[in-house]
Amino acid sequence: MDIPLYEQIVEELKRDILAGRYQPGRKFPSEASLIKRFSVSRITVGRAVRELQQMGFVDRIAGSGTYVRPRSRPQSPVFGLIIPNLGETEIFEPICRAIAVAPEGLNHALLWPQGDDTVELARQCVSRSVSGVFFAPLEMVAESDSVNHQVLRILGDAGIPVVLLDRRPDDNSPRDHFDLVGIDNHRAGFLAARHLLQLGARRIGFVAYRGQALTVKSRIQGYRDALAEFDGVPPHVFYLNPDRPVESAAGFDAFVCANDRVAGRLMHALLARGVRIPEDVRIVGIDDVNYAALLPIPLTTIHQPCRDLGETALRLMLDRLDHPHMPARDVLLDCSLVVRQSCGTIAS
């Protein structure tokens, strides 16, 4: 007996799905493309897709399209961690520790592939069939943009959900595919600059390294907006030269630094030149890493709630696994000022 044409199409599309040609959670070919592929009518294709939906292979979402139905969340998911800048900042270690703590009812594991090749780390996650990946995009190297886009493409093509930690790779990265957990970086820059203004500083520079992530752009804008509220306080952003860190520092009475690493570098250079902190220059950092309180002059800084960031990242990943078609989200947590001696005042 001849098999109806729509059933032949159903069987071929089922084989494609089971073979991994169409990944779980990803968009299924449109009816127009299926009509072209099989040289059949729209009625035949429509019946085949409805059959696939009834069999549990696809979901049809009004106004959005048809998607390959995701696999149910595994009982014991394994999540990958790709943190290429772990050695450059302390914030990621406590974030990852918080991700490792399972909420009640979840028994998950973390795969932390090791190596200097970030793209290869992504391939390792794919080869291990992880349920999702937490990725802190690479920064401050010439190939950062290329590497970050390769990583996201490899994970995206494999249908692996990604939660970005701290930052997006660049302005051109796809915002509709990947969730983000970080702090409100605009507010961080604003709080730091406002604190210095309230202490009477009026020549305030913003110091960063070249090639830092988009988060720094947001911090700079927050700094600019705080200064804009005070007449006659112009912004001045300059980039730290690691070989001559105080070359451009003359004439300022305060600095907002892109992060505590920059602040520490600047502080040591100024002290070596005989500049008194905070008598001559006040400094505020951002991050509140462990060594901020241990610098020669304990550093006033903006605190990142790293534990909350990790817990939020894990919740967002689980939500993404349960609802793969929901719009991508940026979840920005609040931050707070920690006052120490580098500004000449201590917390009350």
Image (spheres, rainbow, N blue to C red):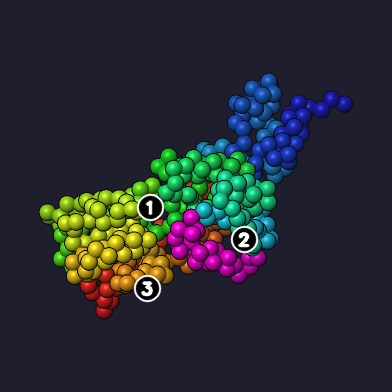
Q: Quadrant of residue 14?
A: top right
Looking at the rendered structure, the kind of residue marked 2 is: Leu
Frontmost residue, 86 versus 225: 86
Looking at the rendered structure, the kind of residue marked 3 is: Leu
The residue that disc 3 covers is 294
Find residue 107 and report its horizontal and vertical position in percent: 65, 65
Decide whether residue 98 is among the magenta residues: yes
Frontmost residue, 32 versus 194: 194
Find residue 231 and report its horizontal and vertical position in percent: 12, 55
Q: Which mark is residue 215?
A: 1
Indicate which disc, 1 or 3, sits on the residue closer to the N terminus: 1
The residue that disc 2 covers is 110
- Measured in 3D between alpha carbons, the distance from the residue under mark 2 to the one under mark 1, in whole angstroms, is 26 Å
Q: Quadrant of residue 226?
A: bottom left
Quick check: 184 above or below 63? below
- Measured in 3D between alpha carbons, the distance from the residue under mark 2 to the one under mark 3, in whole angstroms, is 32 Å
